[in-house]
Structures are given as C-alpha cells and as structure tokens.
Image: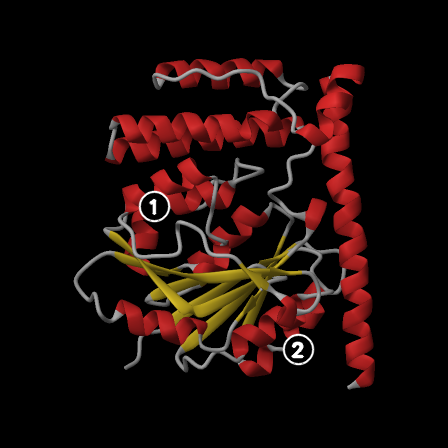
Amino acid sequence: MEPLVSILIPAFNAQQYIGDSLMSAVNQTWPNKEIIVVDDGSSDDTRSIAETFEKAGVRVLTQENQGAAAARNKALSLSSGEYIQWLDADDLLSPNKVAAQVEALRRYPDRRTVISSSWGQFFHRPSRATFKSNGLWCDLTPVEWLTRKMEQNVYMQTATWLVPRAVTEAAGPWDTGLLGDDDGEYFARILLASEQVCFVPEAKVFYRASGTNSLSYIGHSDKKMEAQLRSMRLNIDYVRSLDDSERVRAACVKYLENWLINFYPERLDLVDQAMQLARELGGELALPAFSWKYAGLAAACGPGVAKRARIQLPRMKWAVISWWDKMMHRAQEHSA
C-alpha cells in the first residue's frame, strides 16, 4: 500500500480562494490521500464551497470560531495519514508537490526526516509567483536550520512541509495561545523532534500575499506583539536546547534585533524585555533605527509617527499592486 497523506486545511471566511486551494489538493498526483477541511465558524460561503468537493473525497467539518491553531489541531485529530501536509485556505500546491516529497522520504525509512520545498509568493495569478531562494533552501540539520532562520531573518512557508506522523505526534499540538508566529513556533518543535531536513526543490508551493489580513501581520496590536515576543523566547529556548554555542547565541541576538522594531515605540516594556534577553545571551541591543526612508520623519515628528508611516505606506503599495494584479487576472479570464 502507498502511504496515506493527510492534507489538512483550516478555513475562516475564505470563500474567495478556498475553491482554488481545494482544487490544488484534489489534483495532487499522489493517489493515496485524504483531504480534511475544518471551517472555523465562517460567516461567509466557505463551508458551502468546500462541501462541493465532498464528491471528490474531501471531508468538511465546522466548529465555533476558535482560531487557526485550534482548527489545525481539530483537523489533525481527525486524520489518519502516515504523512501530514498543512495547507492554508488561500494557498496552492503544485500537482506533484506531495508525490515528490513522499518519494524523497522513502530514501530515509529509518530516520526522523522532515521535507521542505520551494515556495513563491503571488497576488492573484499563480503564474506570476516569485520564487526567491534563501539559506533554508537546502538539506540541513535541525540546529543549522533554526540558526540560519535567526541569522538571516528568513523562514519557510507553512505548506512547504511534509512531516511524518511520528514527528508530528512528538512535536505536540499547535499552540492556541499564540495569535502570531504560531507556525514559526510549531515548526521549531517539529524540527526539535526530527533528525534532518531534506529540501525538494521540484515540489512547489504558491503562497498568496494577503497583506494586513495575514495572521502574521502585527501592526499595532498589543496582543500580537506579546505573542510575537513569547514565540521568540520559545524559539530561542528550542535552538539552545540543541546547541548553546557562541554562534547560536549570536544568531538569537540577531533574531531579537531584527524584530525589535515591531515593539517600538508602542511597547517599551517589550523592548526592555528583549534587551534583557539579549544581554543574557551575551549581546546588546540598541533602540531600533529607522531606515533612511523614515529617519527624517522620526527626527522631526517622533518615532511613533515614523512607525505609522512605516506600516501604512507599504500597505498602500501592497493594495495598489494587488488591485492591478487582480484586474489583469480578470482580463485574462475574460479573454480565455
């Protein structure tokens, strides 16, 4: 028997895109798969759209709104696959994504190996997705993967992973208390429970840019700032449990430095906590400096105004690019 792969999809008010995401799951060339959607109390047509795929073998369940992490935990509890594939309700898998990764896992039958893949970001046209490699796009040990993530300020998108159930169970459930970076914290635990990371470039994920609607978007939310720092503390503890070398501690300090601007100037208490943590790691953090685009505004009007501009201007740019890409997508559909 070919091993069963569970494709697990949490969904909340995703009526605009969930049909495309489910089609990419149904069209996987790997034959032995189960697809489970947990609708997290959507108020739109997410559930009814998902139910149109039930004839293709998709299971759809609904729960009261509890957040993406709780929906993922529910989906996992209902699954029975030997391998776990996570997929957000607005992202897409290339047709051979699962098959290529399962074949790679077969090369390591006796090891706790997790598989990652390449991923590209797009707005409305997957054909326009931009794939940009980084230091994580290769075979790595778990400690090297986590260290590079912190040193280089890079990450791997959620749907890129294919994880054996044994590793998934050893890692434990998603943390429902984290409003942000729950995926970063979860996959750090996946890596702790694994022995190696294998990168399969031909397996591809298409990650839809969602701007301020993204769960990872922090903005001015106190709760998300607090969750981010808590997740960072956990990530630092995780990597140091594997290796507490000078290089790893320096990577942890760099990690804190890269994210400090997200707490400044609104939450100086969190800035102080991050600075104290850096000192415990043998480093030192200065107050965040704004880039040249916003430095003059910070000097003239204060860091709070500069921070708001730093958040709002990219949002405006993102909205214009997204609108234009959507218009081009509609034009292509009409011409077809």
Whichever of callouts 1 and 2 sits on the residue coming sooner in the sequence is 2
Q: Residue at point 46% right, 51% down? A: 156
Tag 2 residue? 52
Instruction: Give the crowd class for mark 2: few <14, some 14-19, many >=20 residues within 10 Å.
Output: few
Q: What is the three-letter code of the residue carrying label 2? A: Thr
Amino acid tagged 1:
Trp
Instruction: Name the side, left or right, on which 213 lies relative to 268.
Output: right
- Quarter of the rendering containing residue 58: bottom right
Quadrant location, the C terminus:
bottom right
Look at the image and tell me whether residue 86 can be seen: no
Residue 166 shown left or right of residue 90 in the figure: left
The residue lying furthest to the bottom in this view is: 336
Image quadrant of residue 189? top left
Residue in the foreground of this view, choosing between 57 and 286 = 286
SS for dot 1: helix
Find the residue positioned furthest to the left: 110
| Circle on res. 10 | none
* Relative image position of residue 103 (x, y in whole percent): 30, 74
- Foreground mark, 1 or 2, reads 1
- Mark 1, residues whose alpha carbon is within 10 Å: few (<14), some, or many (≥20)? many
Using the image, tell me which numbered label, if any, was put on residue 145: 1
Q: Is residue 54 visible?
A: yes
Would you identify the image quadrant in which residue 5 lies? bottom left
Q: Position of residue 164 (x, y in %)?
A: 31, 61
**By what rule are the colours in the image chosen?**
secondary structure
Q: Is residue 75 left or right of residue 142?
A: right
**Nearer the observer, 19 or 276:** 276
State if disc 2 and disc 1 touch (CB < 8 Å).
Answer: no
Residue 320, horizontal then vertical, whole percent = 81, 53
The image position of residue 18, as x and y in percent, is 65, 67
Q: In the depicted view, which residue is nearer to us: 75 or 300? A: 300
